[in-house]
Image (tube, rainbow, N blue to C red):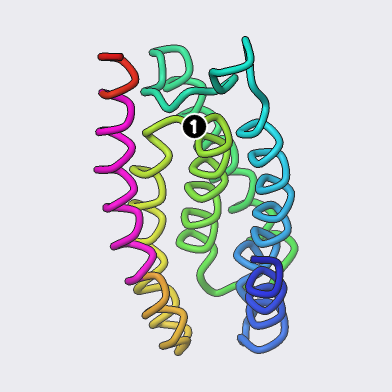
Amino acid sequence: GIIGVLLAAYVYFFMVNPALYADASLNIYYFLMSVYGWYNWVQKKDGSHYTYPISWCTRPQLWFGIGFFLFFWVAIYVVLTQLTNSNTPILDSLVSSSAITAMWWMAKRKIENWLAWIFSNIVAIPLNFYKELMLFSLMYVLFLALAWWGFIEWKKMAKETTNA
């Protein structure tokens, strides 16, 4: 939880040269979205149903998410290239923007969040390996497996909810 977020931010800001600025900042976002998501998940409507049931994105929600991802990818890339000494701005911004999108969809209980996590983890594994952060690469391999499992489980739960 919070210790992992703080530890990752510290490593990415202070122990990697040049730093993975976007990944470090992403941990602050993770914390804030975790609080937001937790709040949404415990809210109930009609005393029995979650405000945000597990479901697939509607077409407008999907297009919004894709636009959200593209906006943050470009914005983070520009910040990294203009204001930092990052030597991996494309990949760093790609990991961060896909994770931002994944976290947003997760807070809204959208199944697509897992697909965004899978993509983010696939990019993060070689990025962390390149930065010689072998334990972080291994962590992202584990996260990739968890994201795949989460995708399968949420699809089942959404189907059960729809059939109920």
The residue sitting at 72% across, 46% down in the picture is 35
- Residue on which the image places disc 1: 109
On the image, the x and y values in percent for residue 3 come to 70, 74
Which image quadrant: the N terminus? bottom right
On the image, the x and y values in percent for residue 11 come to 65, 83
**Amino acid carrying mark 1 in the image:** Arg
The residue sitting at 57% across, 46% down in the picture is 100
Is residue 42 found inside the magenta-colored segment of the image?
A: no
Which contiguous range is marked in magenta?
141-159
Is residue 154 found inside the magenta-colored segment of the image?
A: yes
Vertical position of residue 71 compared to residue 75: above or below: above
Q: Is residue 96 left or right of residue 149?
A: right
The tally of labels here is: 1
Q: Is residue 79 left or right of residue 93?
A: right
Vertical position of residue 90 compared to residue 107: above or below: below
- Specify the quadrant of the image occupied by residue 73: top right
Looking at the image, which is closer to me, 58 or 89?
58
The residue sitting at 71% across, 80% down in the picture is 10
Vertical position of residue 122 compared to residue 142: above or below: above
Which image quadrant: the C terminus? top left
The residue sitting at 38% across, 61% down in the picture is 121
Vertical position of residue 18 compared to residue 31: above or below: below
Q: Residue 25: in sight, yes or no?
A: yes
